[in-house]
Image (cartoon, grey):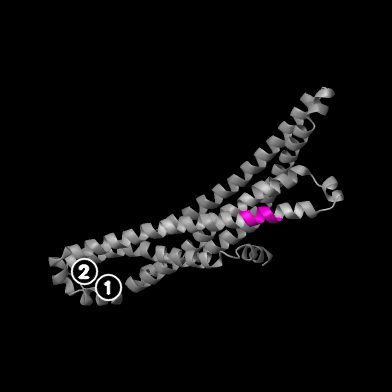
């Protein structure tokens, strides 16, 4: 809850944009599913004049003049398909624009707050803490927040909205097939929860290794004269290579976890198909 409170606090001034973006993503997910559904409607229920089993499609067919009228005026279906895809393009643009505006504005506030906080800390804190850790907090960690706001929130909303809309459409078309389509969803939810609970340790280890690497770079850059004065370049290079190799190995391990997760989850979904 503290993490959500942190995000909510820094969203001040952009909360309406965030709400509008979430609504827009839901509309975008719905339109994405409506486009192929409209193609199916035009081919099956209009051109081939098959009866519409879906009550929504049946209502739409009646209010548009019936199958015979639409067969003589196929441009209506073409115009509807073009209009839906045009709305999808507008939604994609606004989604990217608002994501960028919100994420950059929040990161600006976070950087300003971090800088003001660092200036107010006592001298003893700066003596005790590693400068590389501070550099990482002000760069990599802030960038993680930006990437979360710029992509992850909208992706989560899009995934949930797409799943719910797809389930509604599937159950309205053919319920037995819809039940088969959702049979793996509980397994995927449990698998994702267990995976992300365990992978947090790998992320933390990689993050700490990056902080050690940043500290090594900062100390060598600020103390380069001392290193050269004592002819200690080889030792410092050796230390840096060790920390760099450790950061590489831990990050590679984290990427392996991610690859295993996405590969396994895709396999479960495709096996169901």
Disc ID at residue 45: 2
Ranked by sequence position, the earlier of labels 2 and 1 is: 2
- Residue 173 on the magenta span: no
Estimate the x, y position of residue 189 in percent, counting from the top left: 54, 63
Name the residue at 70% across, 49% down: 137
Q: Quadrant of the C terminus?
A: bottom left
Magenta region: which residues? 108-113
Name the residue at 41% across, 57% down: 92
- Residue 109 on the magenta span: yes
Tell me if 168 is positioned left or right of 21 in this view. Answer: left
On the question of residue 148 being in view, the answer is: no
Say above or below: 43 vs 108. below
Considering depth in this image, is 144 or 107 the residue closer to the camera?
A: 107
Disc 1 element: helix
Main SS of the magenta segment? Answer: helix
Q: Residues within 10 Å of mark 1 (few under 14, many from 20)?
A: some
Where does label 1 land, which residue? Answer: 57
Considering depth in this image, is 109 or 133 the residue closer to the camera?
A: 109
Considering depth in this image, is 263 or 180 the residue closer to the camera?
A: 263
Q: Residues within 10 Å of mark 2 (few under 14, many from 20)?
A: many
* Residue 55 position by quadrant: bottom left
**Which residue appears farthest toward the top when viewing the image?**
231
Estimate the x, y position of residue 64 in percent, counting from the top left: 21, 74
């Amino acid at each position: 809850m503290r993490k959500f409170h942190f995000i909510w606090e820094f969203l001040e001034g952009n909360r309406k944009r965030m709400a509008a973006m979430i609504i827009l993503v839901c509309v975008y997910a719905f339109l994405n599913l409506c486009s192929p559904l409209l193609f199916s409607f035009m081919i099956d229920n209009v051109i081939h004049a098959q009866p519409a089993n879906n009550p929504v499609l049946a209502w739409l067919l009646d209010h548009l003049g019936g199958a015979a009228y639409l067969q003589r005026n196929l441009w209506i279906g073409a115009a509807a398909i073009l209009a839906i895809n045009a709305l999808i393009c507008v939604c994609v643009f606004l989604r990217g624009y608002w994501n960028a505006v919100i994420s950059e504005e929040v990161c600006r506030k976070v950087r300003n707050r971090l800088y003001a906080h660092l200036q107010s800390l006592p001298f003893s804190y700066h003596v005790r803490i590693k400068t590389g850790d501070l550099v990482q907090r002000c760069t990599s960690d802030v960038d993680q927040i930006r990437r979360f706001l710029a992509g992850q929130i909208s992706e989560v909303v899009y995934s949930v909205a797409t799943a719910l809309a797809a389930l509604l459409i599937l159950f309205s078309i053919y319920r037995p097939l819809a039940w088969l389509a959702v049979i793996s969803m509980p397994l995927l939810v449990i698998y994702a929860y267990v995976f992300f609970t365990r992978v947090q340790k790998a992320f933390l280890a990689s993050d700490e290794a990056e902080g050690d690497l940043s500290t090594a770079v900062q100390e060598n850059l600020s103390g380069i004269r001392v290193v050269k004065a004592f002819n200690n370049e080889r030792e410092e290079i050796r230390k840096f290579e060790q920390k760099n190799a450790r950061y590489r190995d831990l990050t590679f391990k984290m990427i392996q976890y991610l690859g295993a997760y996405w590969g396994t989850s895709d396999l479960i979904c495709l096996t169901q198909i």
